[in-house]
Image (tube, rainbow, N blue to C red):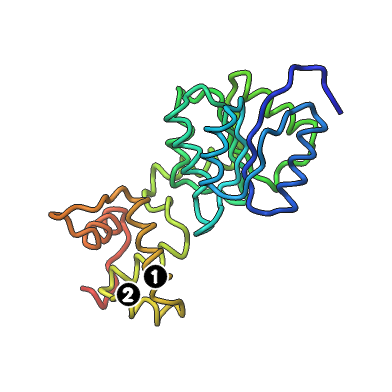
Amino acid sequence: MHTGAPPVRVVLAEDGVLLREGLAGLLGRFGFEVAAAVGDAEELMAAVAAHGPDLVVTDIRMPPSHTDEGLRAAAALRRERPDLAVVALSQYVELSYAGDLLDSADGRRVGYLLKDRIVDVEEFAATLRQVVAGGTVIDPKVVRQLLRRRDDPLSVLSPREQEVLALIAEGCSNGAVSARLFISEATVGKHIGNIFTKLGLPEADDVHRRVQAVLAYLRAGRPLPPAAR
């Protein structure tokens, strides 16, 4: 289905092959020109540099960690090209870099939509064109979560990351966290790295980030577990 509107060049990023191909076909039906359809954030950055699209439509959780790679890439692209229209798609509300994305370029030409709440493909296509035209479209559920984040700075962390941080506050080592949560130490390390990133704790010689993360936990009003008192 073509709308008669001028074609919009799109770079699409989605790690699921079937969904990626389905979205590419859908966009083509509605008159979008899919310049590239890629499966991870690194390929997304390269495709935007190569094709100079009008619009990026990206999933949020992509390889290698399947956390927020797509959202981080989207925020980075907007810093490089504030005029680039970007729509983030997600199965979940991921807040770690949502503020950076939505605040970029005065919030114009940006969207954040939840996949399971898109029920009309024509409306979806119209939403994409609205964003390209300068609009801002944010799912109301995302707005509610962003407002709640102001009251709880730890809401940027996933439930598992919050569990890891709570155990760190107890004084648990990585090995102890691994045993308590039945996950590998390598996975614990990845969660801790995500915690540091999401809480804005950059690596520095004179700062113990593990202690800083526990202090953030306590400032958020979380109780120090009895074992650590």
- In percent of width and height, residue 201 lies at 27, 51
Residue beneath the point at 35% across and 65% down = 165
- In percent of width and height, residue 183 lies at 46, 77
Check disc 1 and report the residue beneath it: 188
- In percent of width and height, residue 36 lies at 66, 38
Q: Do the residues labelled 1 and 2 touch (CB within 8 Å)?
A: yes
How many labels sit on residues?
2
Residue beneath the point at 58% across and 19% down = 134
Q: Distance between the residues labelled 1 and 2?
A: 6 Å
Farthest left residue in view: 206
As helix, strand or loop, the secondary structure at mark 2 comes to helix
Q: Classify residue 61 as left or right of residue 194.
A: right
- In percent of width and height, residue 60 lies at 56, 47
Question: Which amino acid does the dot numbered 1 rest on?
Answer: Val
**Does residue 153 sit above or below 209 in this rendering?**
above
The image quarter containing residue 47 is top right
Tell me if mark 1 has few (under 14), some (14-19) or many (20+) residues whose alpha carbon lies within 10 angstroms of its own. Answer: many
Q: Classify residue 5 as left or right of residue 142.
A: right
Position of the N terminus by quadrant: top right
Of residues 108 and 154, the one drawn nearer to the viewer in this rendering: 108
Question: Which amino acid does the dot numbered 2 rest on?
Answer: Asn
Residue beneath the point at 38% across and 53% down = 154
Of residues 129 and 62, the one drawn nearer to the viewer in this rendering: 62
Position of the C terminus by quadrant: bottom left
Check disc 2 and report the residue beneath it: 174
Farthest bottom residue in view: 179
The image quarter containing residue 169 is bottom left
